[in-house]
Image (cartoon, rainbow, N blue to C red):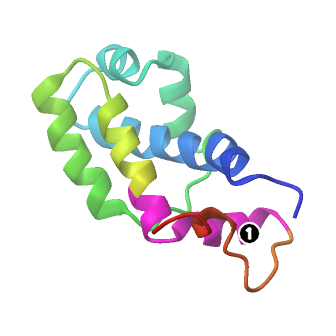
């Protein structure tokens, strides 16, 4: 195992969340407004739509749609929803599936959950 769980979050999970949220929000908002809310560039959103950036293999489409509703109410920042989604990814052990796709992980790995009570 070469990658720490935090690296999985930064390299794979956050970009995938941004992509999914950008695509969902772009259905009802202008690209520039979505970029401001997600704190990314409008060109990043274009690349998400063209599948040039942000590989998605997250199994939380329903949660993304719920986050879209909350973000559209607020229209200021997506950070609270991104935090909620990353917690959901950890709580459902989806982070383990993503980690296994990108690194050699022991079959019985429990690193992220050792100190959870």
Q: Residue at x 59, y 45 (%)?
A: 51
Q: Position of residue 64 (x, y in %)?
A: 31, 52
Q: Residue at x 21, y 33 (%)?
A: 71
Residue that badge 1 annotates: 101
Q: Position of residue 115 (x, y in %)?
A: 57, 63
Q: Position of residue 112 (x, y in %)?
A: 62, 63
Q: Residue at x 49, y 61 (%)?
A: 90
Residue 27, placed above or below residue 38: below
Mark 1: few, some, or many residues within 10 Å (few <14, many ≥20)?
few
Q: Residue at x 57, y 32 (%)?
A: 47
* Element class at badge 1: helix
When asked about the image quadrant of residue 80, the answer is top left
Instruction: Please tell me which residue lies in front, 100 or 69.
Output: 100
Is 30 displayed left or right of 60 in the figure? left
Instruction: Please tell me which residue lies in front, 29 or 113.
Output: 113
Q: Position of residue 97 (x, y in %)?
A: 62, 72
Instruction: Please tell me which residue lies in front, 59 or 31.
Output: 59
Give the main secondary structure, helix, strand or loop, of the magenta stretch: helix
Q: Please check the rendered image and state whether residue 91 is part of the magenta-colored stretch, yes or no.
A: yes
Residue 50: in sight, yes or no?
no
Q: Please check the rendered image and state whether residue 4 is part of the magenta-colored stretch, yes or no.
A: no
Region of the chain picked out in magenta, as a range: 88-103
**Quadrant of the drawing holding the C terminus:** bottom left
Residue 81, placed above or below residue 34: below
Is 59 displayed left or right of 61 in the figure? right
Residue 66: in sight, yes or no?
yes
In the picture as drawn, the residue positioned furthest to the left comes out as 73
């Amino acid at each position: 195992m070469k990658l720490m769980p935090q690296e999985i979050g930064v390299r794979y999970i956050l970009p995938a969340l941004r992509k999914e949220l950008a695509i969902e929000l772009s259905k009802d908002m202008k690209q520039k407004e979505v970029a401001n809310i997600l704190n990314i560039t409008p060109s990043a959103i274009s690349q998400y739509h063209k599948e040039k950036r942000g590989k998605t293999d997250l199994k939380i489409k329903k949660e993304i749609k719920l986050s879209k509703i909350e973000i559209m109410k607020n229209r200021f920042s997506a950070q609270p929803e991104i935090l909620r989604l990353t917690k959901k990814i950890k709580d459902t052990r989806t982070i383990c599936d993503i980690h296994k796709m990108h690194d050699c992980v022991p079959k019985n790995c429990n690193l992220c959950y050792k100190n959870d009570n």
